[in-house]
Image (cartoon, rainbow, N blue to C red):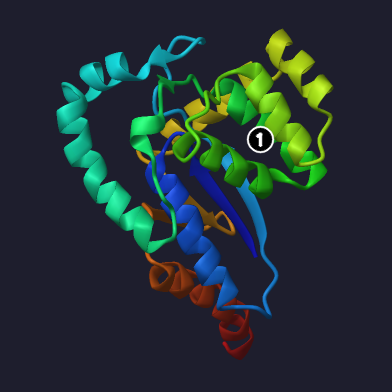
Amino acid sequence: MRIEIVSDVICPWCFIGKRRLEQALAQRPDMEFEIGWRPFQLNPDMPREGADRKSYLEAKFGGPARAKEIYARVSAEGAKEGIAFNFDGIKRTPNTLAAHSVLRWALTTGVQSELKERLFNLYFIEGHDIGDHQVLADAAAAEGMDGALVKTLLDEGRDADVIQDEDRMARELGITGVPFFIFERKYGVSGAQTPDVLLDVIDKISAEPAQAIEA
């Protein structure tokens, strides 16, 4: 079964959604799943060099205090899924265009989900700037990709236009928030839903061929 997840690497709910999807898939061990991650930029107008985290929070939430209130709920939900969010450790909010480019290349080497997990951890737990090309190249190399080549391609801006087109396409399809799960390109589920919700869709799709035969 093909499952595509539209998400951003700086979206905490996308990290939580990834964990919940993994829990759902673990409950269907006899099924085969093909997972793909599609780009979405929460801040498409972010400068390529990113922004100071404090300045970003001032602009988005009116300051760190309000942001802390909002992130408290996210942290609580993350803790339920074993994610120890460290929002205070994030010093810069990156432009995620480069990160999405590397994830696109990771698909061809079969390590896209592994790299997605690594980037989530680097940003939300370790506080790294995942807009930095060297940080991304090192992350790619840790997953078996050619780090030097990744750094060169990022510096050239390779596939940035492709990522922007895919982001635009997602918005044209009506996707305004992430994560957004697409099952077999037929059913969409918005938000970091619980494993039970995701399983309901998986089971519904699994039953469809049998129902068609019976009919």
Which picture quadrant has residue 153? top right
Does residue 49 appear left or right of residue 73 in this picture? Answer: right
Does residue 88 appear left or right of residue 120 in this picture? Answer: left
Query: Is 14 drawn above or below residue 167 in the view shown?
Result: below
Which picture quadrant has residue 108? top right
Query: Which residue is at the front of the view, 58 or 39?
Result: 58
Residue 179 appears in the rendering: no
Number of dots carrying numbers: 1
Quadrant in which the N terminus appears: bottom right
Instruction: Name the residue beneath numbered marker 1.
Output: 103
Q: Amino acid at mark 1?
A: Leu
The local secondary structure at tag 1 comes to: helix
Residue at image x 64%, y 55%? 35
Residue at image x 39%, y 45%? 85
Q: Most extreme residue toward the bottom, as rendered?
A: 214
Query: Which residue is at the front of the view, 12 or 212?
Result: 12
Q: Position of residue 34 (x, y in %)?
A: 68, 58
Residue at image x 36%, y 52%? 191
Mark 1 Cα shell of 10 Å, populated few (<14), some (14-19), many (≥20)? many
Q: Position of residue 190 (x, y in %)?
A: 38, 52
